[in-house]
Amino acid sequence: MQGFRPFFRGLARAALVAATALPVGAAHADDRDPPVVTPGRQDAPPGPSPAAPAPLPMSDSGRRAVRGCDVGESCDHLLAGLRAFEREAFPRRRGASPWGDGERITASRAPGARSPRRRPASPTELRPDLPWLAGLEMPDLPVHWDHRIIRFLEFYVEDPRGQQLMRAWLRAQGRYRDLIVRELRRAKLPEDLLYVAMIESSYDSRERSRVGASGLWQFMPGGGSIYGLRQDRWIDERNDPVRATRAVTAYFADLYQRFGDWDLAMAAFNAGYGAVLRGIAKYNTNDFWQLLEYENALPWESSVYVPKALACAIVGRNRKKLGFGDVEPLPPMSFDVVAVPKSVSLAVIARAAGVDADDVEALNPHIRRGRTPPGERDFQVRIPAGRADEFARRFPQLRGEWDSHDAYVVRHGERFEDIATVHGVSVRKLLELNGLDSERDVTGGMVLVVPRVSEAEKADNRTRARESLYAAGVPEGEPGGKLLVAVPDPTLVVKGRRRVFYRVVTGDSLYRIAQVFRVEVADLAAWNGLDPAAHIHPRMVLQVWIDPRLDTAAAGVALLDPERLAVVKAGSEEHIVAAEKLVGRERQVYTAERRESYEQIGRKYGLTARDLARINRKPFDTVLEPGETCIVYKVVDRSASDRAAEQARAARGGKRRK
């Protein structure tokens, strides 16, 4: 977790939340999940879903690492259940936390101090000059009074910056308070863990940290995976306030199971349980506040994180007394859930529901690309409360807007431009449709949204795409339209394996290709004369020796047709002659009749001195004596390529190429 946020950054972010959070509908009055309707389907009428929340696919092994024992088992002593009952049934005083009262005598001293001192039982013992600290209602988290907590309270109550920040936070809290408290109650956790989300994200479900934490609770990718939150290019459930809150209750419960102390559990939520365990082992104490007195016991962020969260909870419990009674919270998030039969844009869903697209996007921050994932039926989407009937009526009427697309699984090695061609759309439009910035983001196995075309049209387009593939870099007139492929050794045979040819596409790497073909990276590099540490590039063609039993079609791999390839030895005369023929040039040996420089010779052929230097692998200022030779490339078909046309123009005295 990346919990700490500097004051000024938090102030700006909270102000943004307060300005942009969307009040949608009215709150549900009870603890039940909102109703689910499934409009737009022709085989079943709309109807409610069960009230029980869908389970999250959590990782038991990951949770075991967090909690310190198997999920479903208690790591505590057998008397722990009795102690829990006593805390719940016999609270020590009105407003006291069932998790501990915070009034014990303990050591709180810096290294070198000789005797322990009593920890203050009330804040006024520490700051008698702040009379407003007296008589505060305490949160249901244990509060052990410390100067750090009071400093945060001073900031929120007396500093104009803190007042503005807290007002923005309390206003934004209204959107998610009911949801979070409901889930905390369901998990039998302290309700004031609500304020952890306040300092984590300012109640902004789209918040993302510079280190990759995301959502209300700032789950890191690894933690999100452990607690069952889906993360892919279409969906990031870390940003789903409902699913993420359900997941975080399990995380909090696991941390409390391990530490048995909410201060340590919150510190572990911020810094990671491993960092807290190291501090405990190093200084041989499980007292969070004592650990703060030791050098390098806990991260600095955690030393302010816990006091900051507790101070927020205290303010939240004492809004009127501390000057925030006039803050008007945003209306609670309220929604109906509808299911769509295929990939549909949120804009179309909003039109069907008769609401603004911004309202639907605000309720579905986990949908990353502005549309539901392709290839998934009955994907559930939230719409503003009370709009389900309207959606059910209008969604079928908009069928032409949402039923004109299909899902397509990209094959490894398949060019993005070919996918666009087959489905009758431009590369730019296909990128836009899928929320992609570049075809570099497309990888084998990815599911794309594509326009629907008839099978006949698709077949014609596929033929055109295939011809474009083999003609890539090959001008018209090449015998048989074969694609020239240069390899270190065309006669190579690897016993027990068969050879296939794979065309590199944008975003490929040797590692990824080796994984797909189930070969070693070192072998793949050796077969193709490559440096395994360097990048590979689109339009390269690799020969791969694979297990004959590997079903490349089932693995979703696009291979080149060996019958449409001209395979030659890289650097051979055959290779060079063929390669130059493809661009409309002929390789010739030039013999100097008099003393001539590369610049003088090149001028006759439309080449520069540096062209000849590269061709002949000699310095550009080389001068040939009579009878000496060099290699030149002469244009024989200026229409074969732009390069040939430009060179022919230069040979006739046109503008010289640089």
Image (spheres, rainbow, N blue to C red):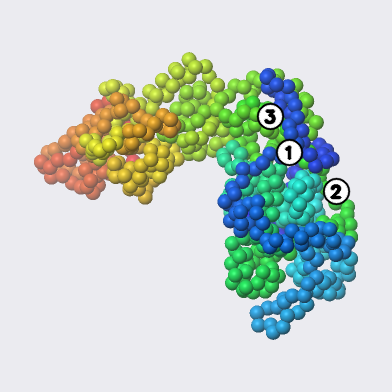
- Find residue 3 and report its image quarter: bottom right
| Residue at figure coordinates x 49%, y 27% from the top left | 420
Contact (Cβ within 8 Å) of mark 3 with mark 2: no
The residue singled out by tag 3 in the image is 339
Question: Quick one: quadrant of the N terminus?
Answer: bottom right
| Residue at figure coordinates x 22%, y 35% from the top left | 491
Mark-to-mark CA distance, 2 and 1:
31 Å
For this orientation, the residue located farthest to the left is 627
For this orientation, the residue located farthest to the bottom is 114
The residue singled out by tag 2 in the image is 328
Q: In x, y percent, where is residue 381?
A: 69, 33
| Residue at figure coordinates x 16%, y 44% from the top left | 624
The residue singled out by tag 1 in the image is 52
Question: Can residue 531 be seen at all in this image of the molecule?
Answer: yes
Classify 10 Å Cα crowding around label 1: few (below 14), some (14-19), many (20 and above). Answer: few
* Residue 455 circle label: none
- Identity, as a three-letter code, of the amino acid under mark 3: Ala
Mark-to-mark CA distance, 3 and 2:
33 Å
Q: First in sequence, mark 1 or 3: give its number.
A: 1
- Find residue 655 and report its image quarter: top left
Contact (Cβ within 8 Å) of mark 2 with mark 1: no
Classify 10 Å Cα crowding around label 3: few (below 14), some (14-19), many (20 and above). Answer: some
Pair 3/2: label in front:
3
As rendered, which of 507 and 557 lies closer to the eye? 557
Left or right, 300 with respect to 463, comes to right
Pair 1/3: label in front:
1
Q: Secondary structure at mark 3?
A: strand
| Residue at figure coordinates x 25%, y 47% from the top left | 620
- Identity, as a three-letter code, of the amino acid under mark 1: Ala
Q: Secondary structure at mark 1?
A: loop
